[in-house]
Amino acid sequence: MKQEENPWSKGIVLICTKCSKSISTKSLKEDGNTADNLKMYLKKSFKDSGDGGKVRVVTSSCLDLCIDETQAVTYCGVDGITETFAIHPEEDREKILQYLRNKISE
């Protein structure tokens, strides 16, 4: 097995794709899959701030945190610490972005 050097220096963000099925479209402003929308928002925000190489943002299958009307998001730092959140994919996106920015600046 060949091990590659980590292409991102601080961590990875996993966004559950299954959660979008449990979020009411009435509470959403954007069309499309909530996981993909949140992923693109975070990726663009990190790229625009110059932090794109510090964190990888990807969608994932079920993260096994199933709470109606929320999106599961997990941050896995290169330090081995993993944190999982249940957020609203639009209303809480600024909060999770700021939290992740703080994590990758430590």
Image (cartoon, grey):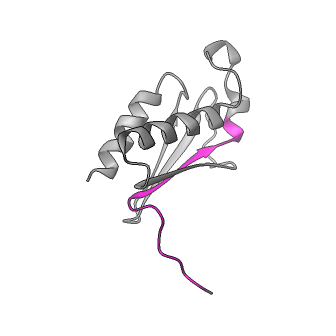
- Image point (53%, 77%), residue name: 4
In the image, what residue occupies the spot 30% across and 44% down?
A: 102
Residue furthest out toward the bottom: 1
Was residue 5 drawn as part of the magenta stretch in this picture? Answer: yes
Which residue is at the far top? 26
Looking at the rendered image, the quarter that the N terminus falls into is bottom right
- Which residue is rendered at x = 45% and y = 61% of the image? 8
Q: Residue shown at 47%/75% (left/top)?
A: 5
Percent across and percent down for residue 78 are 40, 64
| Along the line of sight, the residue nearer the viewer: 37 or 60 | 37
The spot of residue 82 in percent (x, y) is 44, 56
Picture layout, residue 8 above or below residue 21: below
- Location of residue 57 in the rendering, given as x and y in whole percent from the top left corner: 53, 48
Tell me, yes or no, whether the highlighted magenta stretch contains residue 99: no
Q: How many marks?
A: 0
* Quadrant hosting residue 18: top right
The relative height of residue 84 versus residue 30 in the rendered view (above or below) is below
Q: Is residue 96 left or right of residue 67?
A: left
Residue toward you, 104 or 86:
104
**In the rendered structure, which segment of residues is drawn in magenta?**
2-19
Residue 87 is situated, as x and y percent measured from the top left of the image, at 51, 32
